[in-house]
Image: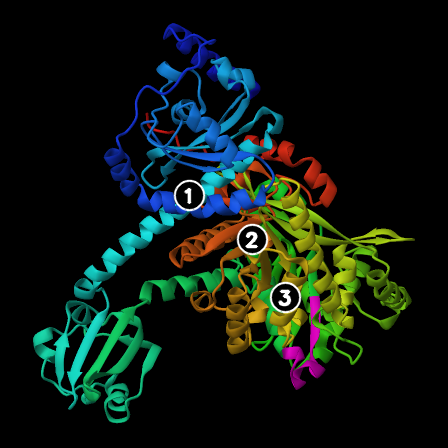
Amino acid sequence: MSATKERQYIRNSNKLSSASGISPEEIVRPSAYLTNNQLVEKRELYKDILEVIRSFTNKFLNSLKGTPILLMVSDEESYILEIMGDQSLKDSLEEAGFQPGAHCSLQVLGTNVVSLALQENEPVQVVGDDHYNKHFHRIASYGSSYHYTDIDRLLGSLSFITTVEYENPLFLSMLSNFVDAVERELLLRKRNRQLNIMNQIMLSRTRNAIIITDADGKVTEYNHFAEVISGFTREEIIGRDIFASPRTGSYFKEVIHNEKIYKDVEMHFYNNNGERMICLFDAQPIYENDVMIGAFAQLRNITERYLMEEKYNYLAYHDELTGLPNRRYFHSELEKVMKSDECQDTALLLVDLDQFKNINDTFGHSQGDRVLIEVTERIRGCIGQEDMLARISGDEFIILLKNNGKDGETIAEQVVQQFKEPFTINHNQFHLTGSIGVTIYSDDVKSLEDYIVQADTAMYRAKSQGKNCYVVYTPEMYKDTSEELLLEHDLRMALEQDQFELHYQAQVNSQTGSIIGVEALIRWNHPERGVIPPYKFIPLAERTGLIVPIGEWVIERACLQNKEWISKGLPPIKVSVNLSIQQFLKQNIVDTIAAILKRTEFDPQYLELEITESMAMDFSYAEATINQLRDLGVQISMDDFGTGYSSLSYLKNFAINSLKIDKSFVTDILIDENDAKIVGTIIAMADGLGIKVIAEGVEDEGQLHFLSNQNCFEVQGYYFMKPTPAHEFEERYLQLTEEFKRKSTVPKKKVKK
């Protein structure tokens, strides 16, 4: 809120107070009160609301022990419903007539925080001589209205009240966070009540196919949605032997004869109308007085979701323009090959189109796309059916030769020859060339990255030799590893000598501009080399196993820092920390996190652990570990979503709080239709599963607008701030919140008057 606007609403209120004939010198008291019965009735009406407010108030007041502060709750008509907090302040207010049931009228009391909070569309502060009546000049008050946000219904106001000696603008930010938390909880409880009502209705109006049989397998119930899914009418099925069903008969036999229970069995079939159906099948025995009397089964139609997931998987792993595998798909396939004996007879050819940018600049991107499609067809004609061709960036293609790696040079020459034929655009012919790096698999290749780096090194050597040629990688091109060995030694010393530091990057609600959390990011302050970025030492730490103690240090330091911020008056926010796969797969990871929380005495609700999709490969272990971590009270987020191996179906089974859309998707959402579709699909599906989404790597306003239009309002990236040291984040907190509000692109809802 600007200072100008703040002065204006105080000025307007004081002007109205004067016009109402109120004397600033006389002690004023409320002129209207609810009767005891009316107050009881009003509190009963606000029972759930007051319960929510009390739960948050206790935590808030405990965090400000030693500070004389009150929380005052009013209804939408300015009647005080409850006052909580410092007893001496409370006694002073009650002596002046401010007690539950009192009416805080601007026309009677003059400028007061309750009236202004209900009148304005955003939080207000009334400090000292802002009050019209001099009797209140000892008070600093901060107020905000609160609502049912789903229908924008005004419920009342919440006010923090203290003495002017403790006046602090930070209270306004704390109040905003307090109100946000109350409104979220109110909405959640409201939706839970609605859900309970809906569950009762669904018992009779479920959209699942319901099949019930007797103990002999005769169908006794077959609801409307069973007709829809199967294509058979109820009359055709009632009384028939379910064991004869080609799709469900064997399952019902096991249920009835062996009392077996089935859950989430995925079934694919074409129904009696020829429609493709994908359903999840559940079945279990029905008992009466411990005697099995039949079977119950239901089929949930997931056809639309399944087909959407198939589409998502295709878009995530293919280049939409050429239809070729993309970088993610190529890496996953190459990794499979390298884990098998097939890798011994393979080769990689990295093809980079020379000066392709000139074509886009001269003829436009649409014509450039036509050239890329033709390049794809020409290269495809040089390789065998078992080989793989992928487009890994705008003008880069990569070939994996399987079972014929020794022919790498021959095929590279064929590709070079393909570029001798001119390309045609708008009846104009021109030539395009390519530089090719060839590497043939050898025992020196230690990893997928090494293999690709070798091809990349050879490709750049081809460019340096004049382009339009190929170069075969040789060991002489390999960079000396002595520097890495020295770095490993220094890395082992860094933890002991406290050379690491955490920087923090804010996570922002783009609707309000409020800071909802921070991500802790490690930096290495090397005494001789200066600051070493994570991408240079994290892979080394992972290869040497040092990532585990470093990761534990990061978690503990982040907890201590967040706790220190809270003790200094910053609003409680979550801090997110990345877990490495080595940490996650350690059998004692849950005990480790529990020990850190105990040592730091840190509230676990404000710790978020970020895992990656690759950690979900061992489904049983991942599910059990995530559940145990959640039982500690910490939050779980799936980081870099869309780049790993897991299926979206995992999300419904894992108890995760949120997922982060990977920066690689966000970067090009405004220019790459494929990435835009992926991002939109992820947001829609996560919303359907009730999982929060945060987009990382937001670097400009256009990306923020796009994400907001897709209903993704939690974002992180350089558009708001770069990672910054803890002390700088603390010092600039209020400035950052104001900057973030200005950058917020989503208009706030207006309060109905």
User: Label 2: which residue?
Assistant: 665
Q: Quadrant of residue 342?
A: bottom right
Q: Residue at x 51, y 66 (%)?
A: 631
User: Label 1: which residue?
Assistant: 53
Tell me, yes or no, whether the highlighted magenta stretch contains residue 601: no
Question: Which contiguous range is marked in magenta?
Answer: 337-349
Q: CA distance from mark 2 to mark 1?
A: 40 Å
Do tag 2 and tag 1 residues touch (Cβ < 8 Å)? no
Q: Residue furthest bottom?
A: 257
The amino acid at mark 1 is Ile
Q: Position of residue 614 (x, y in %)?
A: 58, 69
Circle nearer the N terminus (3, 1): 1
Do tag 3 and tag 1 residues touch (Cβ < 8 Å)? no
Q: Quadrant of residue 170?
A: top right
Residue 43's disc is: none
Query: Would residue 196 be found to the left or right of residue 182 on screen?
Result: left
Q: Secondary structure at mark 3?
A: helix
The amino acid at mark 2 is Phe
Q: Residue at x 24, y 90 (%)?
A: 253
Q: CA distance from mark 3 to mark 1?
A: 31 Å
Does 750 appear above or below 704? above
